[in-house]
Amino acid sequence: YVLVLESGIRGFSVQPHYVVLTFACIVNLAYLFAVRLGADARRQAILQLTMDVLLVTALVYLVGPQSLYVVYYFAVVLGAAAVLGMRAAMSVAVQSALFLGMVAALYYFHAKTGLWLVADQVLKDTETSPSFLASFATFYALGFFAVAFLAGKLSEEVRQARILNDEILQNMAGGVVAVDRFGAIAYVNAQGRRMLDIKDGAVGAEYARVMPKQAAELFRRALSGGELKQANDELIET
């Protein structure tokens, strides 16, 4: 979209930050394939978050620290909190603050001599006074840490609530089976596995493949609508 908009306004030209954006898309596709192939999820998340910080830093360097690309740091911090928790979010906040400070320092020391791959117009449009750059970097650094703390606390509370709900469901006397709209098992507690003879590791599998034929037929009728109570009664009787 950015490339099309740029070409429509002033004619298409390949800019360095467009190359970075394209590379970021390719890297995200590579992450997706790696996860599908069974790569370690935690290590993959750490690698992706680190790479995202570097890519955002490259964009901020090429377009200027006062560009909107700087807010992408917040997205990476939020992602770290959601996936890995507060400690990871704080670590990403530290990385983001350090790299943003480095970019601000480069713009201050090389405003007159020029920066590699940075257009002269970007340098002209960027405020490079030391007081402004210092306050700018400090303001965003404090913002990174505040977002990391708040998002990390929220992530921990959600995780604790999820653990509590899982414990309640696992210790229920009745069986609980959740199936998503695609027919894959989203959740099954221990009692549900015993009642329906479902093996461990069935989450994500199609219910018709892991359930007994009679139980799968009752689920199919219930999911089709209009026969939920009758199917439930028949399932209890079996």
Image (cartoon, rainbow, N blue to C red):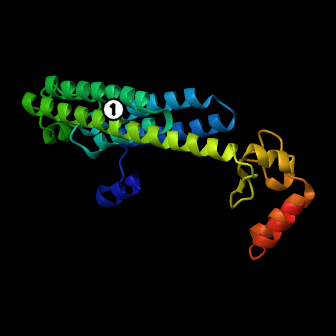
Percent position (x, y) of residue 226? Answer: 75, 77
Quarter of the figure that contains the N terminus: bottom left
Percent position (x, y) of residue 220? Answer: 81, 65
Query: Up-down: is 171 above or below 50?
Result: below
Q: Can the viewer see residue 210 in this picture?
A: no
Q: Residue 230 lies in what quarter of the image?
A: bottom right
Quarter of the figure that contains the C terminus: bottom right
Side of 22 relative to 139 (left or right) = right
Residue sticking out furthest to the bottom: 226
**Residue under numbered circle 1:** 57
Percent position (x, y) of residue 126? Answer: 15, 39
Residue occupying image coordinates x 84% and y 61%: 236
Side of 180 relative to 56 (left or right) = right
Side of 204 relative to 139 (left or right) = right
Residue occupying image coordinates x 69% and y 61%: 181
Which residue type carries mark 1? Answer: Thr
Bin the neighbour count of mark 1 within 10 Å (Cα to Cα): few under 14, some 14-19, many 20 and up. many
Q: Nearer the viewer, residue 102 or 144?
A: 144
